[in-house]
Image: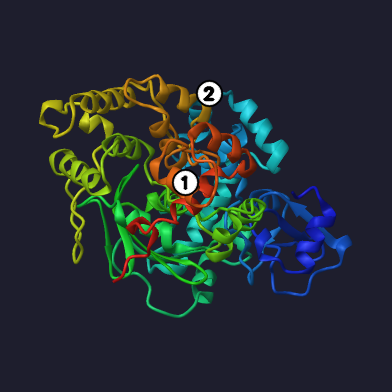
Amino acid sequence: MHTDTERCLRAVQSKDARFDGWFYTAVLTTRIYCRPSCPVVPPKPENMRFYPSAAAAQQAGFRACKRCRPDASPGSPEWNERADLVARAMRLIADGIVDREGVPGLAARLGYSTRQIERQLLAELGAGPLALARAQRAQTARLLVETTALPMAEVAFAAGFASIRTFNETVQEVFALSPTELRQRARPGPRGTVPGALALRLPFRQPLNPDNLFGHLAATAVPGVEEWRDGAYRRTLDLPYGHGIVALAPRPDHIDCRLSLTDLRDLAGAIARCRRMLDLDADPEAVDGLLREDPRLTPLVDKAPGRRVPRTVDADEFAVRAVLGQQVSTAAARTHAGRLVRAHGEQIDDPGGGLSHLFPSAAALAGLDPEQLAMPRTRRATLTGVIAALCSGALQLGVGTDRDAARAQLAALPGIGPWTVECIAMRALGDPDAFTPTDLGLRRAAAGLGLPHTPAALIRHSALWRPWRAYAVQYLWATDDHPINHLPKN
């Protein structure tokens, strides 16, 4: 979008928050870059330059505005919508791959050369993978500086910097303030004193309807791994450097996020996973605008706009849970998953809460005895087949996965039909166009609205909803009075 100068100018002059994260405005006279909704008086058009990423603006020599904090705006919805190389790379960078494995690790996961990835990212985003990862480290550092009382040396290494000197230079360059000055400017209030405990605000584009989003997560919560407590969805996180616990609560203009991490180096990755799970980088104006063009969906969208797709923090975990949920009720699926967790999950401590385990990894489930599973023999075989494929690498469902390739890998496994493939594509792979035409709840909702309700006819009609069919599913499911559609009561 940053190449459409007229559209960018209109967004800046109207201070339109819907475009925050889509592009960044740099001002030649002040050498500052802002989000489109910055409250300051807009500069003259001839003094504006537009960039597709905060990293590109920083690389061009601009520093972040101290009022609108553009580096903390919602992420671009393109990286969820698109499935090409650049989008896959951006999802992996957000997950911290460059910090952990370097650019060669990023290239290996994507199956391209480092040169090709550099070229593609530079052409589209104006910054290579190292610059994009550096911008993310700067944002992580600011979060730690402003929300904790950690010594600056610990902040530097937790944010991913190789040295304190690099940390100081980067913070000064990006924010035009030293780390100490950043901390002094932060809002007064208690800072986390418990190691690894953080209180954050996760931004999103308005509107956001929390009912089906949190309702679904709470209604399908696996005992010991997830719970609804004191108005927040809580769950355990299995992260690269250790484990964590997150509590997420909806607020009118943000998601309240309380994170407890055993290793603060996991902060950026944990935030990225929470944002993906809650679909916070979606563009509801674009989604709802297209769905309203179908007169059958218009009343549903107008009644409760801003529905998101409830996703997951771990794609492998969801694949296992999707198989456990085949042809059984929500309660039965939770029971099956809970048994797996108690038998194979790693135990953790949760003072004051009810969480007790991490969901077991595919490797931890590799020795599973299928005869101990209280389910039909064919489903046992399907489950062990999925686990074996995840362990061997024959099935890859990570954030940088090619969605079409993953669909083909899933469909090749015995017992994995179209419903399971599309559920995994929707919630684990984050495909905004995933669609489940054989789902009984979806077909019942379609029939009630006068829509075609046989799978073939529903697929044909759903062409009107592309590329947002996963969101159409949420609106259709919401016509049923099921617990997944209601925000839990405290």
Q: Residue at x 68, y 43 (%)?
A: 125
Camera-side residue of 208 and 137: 208
Neighbourhood count class around disc 2 (C-alpha, 10 Å): few under 14, some 14–19, many 20 upward: few
Q: Where is residue 315 in the image (x, y as percent from the top left)?
A: 38, 38
Helix, strand or loop status at disc 2: loop
Q: In this view, does 451 lie above or below 322?
A: below
Q: List the residue tagged with mark 2.
A: 111
> In which quadrant is the C terminus drawn?
bottom left
Q: Residue reaching furthest right?
A: 46
Name the residue located 66 percent from the left edge and 55 percent from the top edge.
289
The amino acid pointed to by label 1 is Ala
Q: Position of residue 445 (x, y in %)?
A: 46, 49
**Which mark, residue 367?**
none
**Cα gap from disc 2 to disc 1, whole angstroms:** 27 Å
Instruction: Determine whether the residue tagged by mark 1 lies in a helix, strand or loop.
Output: loop
Q: Residue 78 location, x and y as percent?
A: 62, 45
Q: Nearer the viewer, residue 406 or 457?
A: 457
Q: Which amino acid does label 2 sit on?
A: Gly
Question: Upstream in the sequence, badge 2 or badge 1?
Answer: 2
**Relative side of 325 to 18, left or right:** left
Quick check: can you spot residue 152?
no
- Count residues near mark 1 (Cα–Cα under 10 Å), then give few for <14, some for 14-19, many for 20+: few
Q: Residue furthest bottom?
A: 188
Q: Mark 1 points at which residue?
A: 162
| Residue shown at the point (20%, 52%) measured from the top left | 224
The answer to whether residue 179 is visible is yes
Left or right of 243, for residue 393: right
Question: Is residue 332 shown above or below 9?
Answer: above
Front: mark 2 or 1: 2
Quadrant in the rendering for residue 227 = bottom left
Position of 53 relative to 321 (above/below): below
